[in-house]
Amino acid sequence: MANRGEIACRILRAVREEGALGIAVYSDADRGALHVSLADEAHRIGPAPVAGSYLDPAAILEACRRSRAELLHPGYGFFAENADFAEAVERAGLIWVGPPADVIRTMGDKLAARRAIEGTGVPLVPGSGALPADPEVAHAHALELGYPVLVKAAFGGGGRGMRRCADRAGLVAALDLARQEAGRAFGDATIYLEKLIPRPRHIEIQILADRHGNVIHLGERECSIQRRHQKLLEESPTPAPFPGLRERMGEAALAIARRVGYVNAGTIEFLVDAEGRFHFLEMNTRLQVEHPVTERVVSFDMVHRQLRIAMGEPLDRRQEDIRWRGHAIECRINAEDPEHGFVPSTGRIAALHLPEGPGVRNDVGIMVGSEVTAHYDPLLGKLIVWAENREEAIARALRALREYRIAGVKTNLPFHRWLLTHPRFARGETDTGFLEEEYRPDEVARDREEVTAIVAAAWTAYRAAPARTGPRPAGGTSAWRQSGRPGTASGGGGWR
């Protein structure tokens, strides 16, 4: 398992259930991490900075050699979409749990991906080719597309190397910044232009393909709640009011997967405009962070299928076997301060209480004592809930978020509570500009203060209550009745 955090824990558990041994790697900062404790075997690969550990191919391959590993799962991030590393893994005699390296290389280059799917009938966001150094050429392309436009990095994702430009001055200022950011983040400074689609929904289709030519899709995920192009909450199915959207996008995703010879798990991302027209955005050639919401609505374990596909097994379901039931929501729980620009928070986890109950799942990579450092992504875990419909799923997610407790670092738990109670979100009226238009840090702060006050009051009442040393006296009155709550003798009505 060439990764860390919650995804390493998720995959190591699946490996155990498959009857195999799970091998972890770790940096000095992760010596006591949860994924290390879950593994059957763990190997140090270097210091805390990723360049000397999780992004050191020689160190990871040496750990594979020492442990006599047979398969390598990259998780997401790090080397998950690195074609050169996938080739190195296979040259070392291991099985790569992912698509072929040439497919990763094609679909990881957004310009090459656009060329690859031409002729499939899948609509593309209007765009340019690679931009030369001359800003006037970029301006000419922008005029042809029509301002506003996006400057985008040809490689990578997560919003890095991306700039929105409303006019020539903004475009000229953005070009060098985008190139520099893309070069630092992805090792390639190639950039291009895309027409900006106003107020789109970001909706993706999950696909699975085996080595025998079988390809299926598992439906859609709505990922429009984003901050700086980083997803914060995902749900399935989409609340978008467009009949037949799943079927049309699903067929488009299958056409793309077949065109490029895809194998294993992948995600086709689309932008959907206000009229329900969708446009291909990009393909993620790996397991997605948000895969649990799909697993829940189709009752399908994707990681088990990934492993089996890598071992050469055919898919055990056909497209007509896939059924969607209920509604799932995933909240990404990050170590960051939502009241002050979502700046990352570091520290040691002093206390942790995970919500439980019907329809609640926690994928976490932390435990009490875990050290949250500035070296890695701030994702601590994911809260996934399922219910029979969207309204009930929102209520369940709110209940679970109010039970969630993390001490030692700031988290975005108050943000998620604010989001799920927002009237526009409740109505399903979301798009990628939602947070830019609606987010109010002061409202998040009030939510945090209210929850803190409730917890403090409950703890004070608990500490002040006299210890009960024997049975309640005959005719005694319970604290519940004394509270005057509905359903009690003093409160009247309700539960009996």
Image: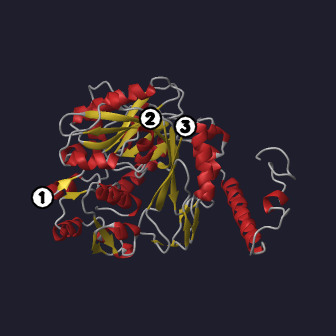
State the residue at coordinates (80%, 48%): 487
**Label whose residue precedes the other's in the sequence (1 or 3):** 1
Identify which residue, 240 or 474, lies in the foreground.
Answer: 474
State the residue at coordinates (61%, 38%): 391
**Closer to viewer: mark 2 or mark 3:** 3
Q: Amino acid at mark 1?
A: Gly
Q: CA distance from mark 2 to mark 3?
A: 27 Å
The residue pinned by badge 3 equals 388
Say what secondary structure mark 1 lies in.
Answer: loop
Q: Is residue 279 depicted above or below 234 in this figure?
A: above
Q: CA distance from mark 1 to mark 3?
A: 46 Å
The residue pinned by badge 2 equals 271
Location of residue 78 in the rendering, given as x and y in whole percent from the top left corner? 32, 59
The residue pinned by badge 1 equals 93
Location of residue 68 in the rendering, given as x and y in whole percent from the top left corner? 16, 66
Question: How many neighbours does mark 2 have within 10 angstroms: few (below 14), some (14-19), or many (20 or more)?
Answer: many
**Label whose residue precedes the other's in the sequence (1 or 2):** 1
State the residue at coordinates (56%, 36%): 389
Q: CA distance from mark 1 to mark 2?
A: 39 Å
**Which residue is most to the right?**
490
